[in-house]
Amino acid sequence: MRKRHPMTSNDVALVETITSWWSREVEDRVRYNGWNAYLVTFTFNHIPGSAPAKLRLMQDRVSRFYSKLVTRVVRRPNSVAQLFARPRMMVAPDYPVFKYEKIGLQAVTVNDGLHLHSILTVPLQSRLKEDVASHVEQRPYLYVKSPLRQIHFQPIENNTRGVTDYVMKTIKRRNCRWEDVFFLPKSPSELSSG
């Protein structure tokens, strides 16, 4: 049985604020700046240890994925001139939700079903010669490192708020903490502090 995390009314308000802000951020980048947006699902092979240890390792692998991707999108990711052109990601933990359709046994049993969802935005004008989903699919040797098993991309064409709600559903159901959500790229202050 998954532990439910208590949420105060301030926590609920914060999660709603984050969800609203991020969906507007994605919509603005797509509509006004010509970016592509994707729902990205990261699934993993078995990871031993506690749920927090599993989550930390998963988050580390997604951060490594981003580190590889950002250098293929912009030439110098830490350059002030390139700050706006870096891809943006919001990453949240997720557990499968039982619905009427069947969920594969592996999705429920490996790591107790824990995986990560992300909303990724990438500028159309970049060093990539193809869309990011094709780029990653053609180069799994760069991005899929154990225990990461699979990266699945689904373009977001509309209903950004609904997709953002979907990514945050495990937080809203209190199966994970809002502090488990993270954003990439890191802020310059986080980069300088290590």
Image: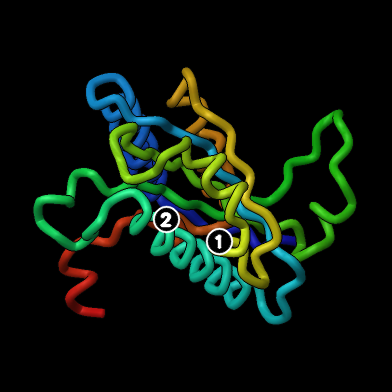
Amino acid residing under circle 1: Tyr
Counting from the top left corner in percent of width and height, residue 101 is at 86, 30
Asked whether residue 8 is in view, the answer is: yes
Rounded to the nearest whole Å, what is the CA distance between mark 2 and mark 1?
8 Å
Name the foreground residue: 61 vs 171: 61
Asked whether residue 175 is in view, the answer is: no
116 on left or right of 32: right
Taking 3 as reference, is 82 above or below it? Answer: above
Amino acid residing under circle 2: Leu
Counting from the top left corner in percent of width and height, residue 188 is at 17, 64
Image quadrant where one finds the C terminus: bottom left
Q: How many marks?
A: 2
Q: Residue 143: which numbered mark, if any?
A: 1
Figure quadrant of residue 34:
top left
Q: Residue 69: which numbered mark, if any?
A: 2
Figure quadrant of residue 57:
bottom right
Taking 170 as reference, is 192 above or below it? Answer: below
Question: Which residue is rendered at x = 53% and y = 68% of the image?
Answer: 61
Question: Which residue is rendered at x = 40% and y = 57% of the image?
Answer: 182
59 on left or right of 15: right
Q: Secondary structure at mark 1?
A: helix
Mark 2 vs 1, N-terminal side:
2
Taking 27 as reference, is 80 above or below it? Answer: below
| 2 and 1 marks in contact (CB < 8 Å) | yes
Name the foreground residue: 22 vs 79: 79
Question: Which residue is rendered at x = 53% and y = 72% of the image?
Answer: 56
Counting from the top left corner in percent of width and height, residue 125 is at 29, 34
Image quadrant where one finds the N terminus: bottom right
Q: Secondary structure at mark 2?
A: helix
Taking 97 as reference, is 191 above or below it? Answer: below
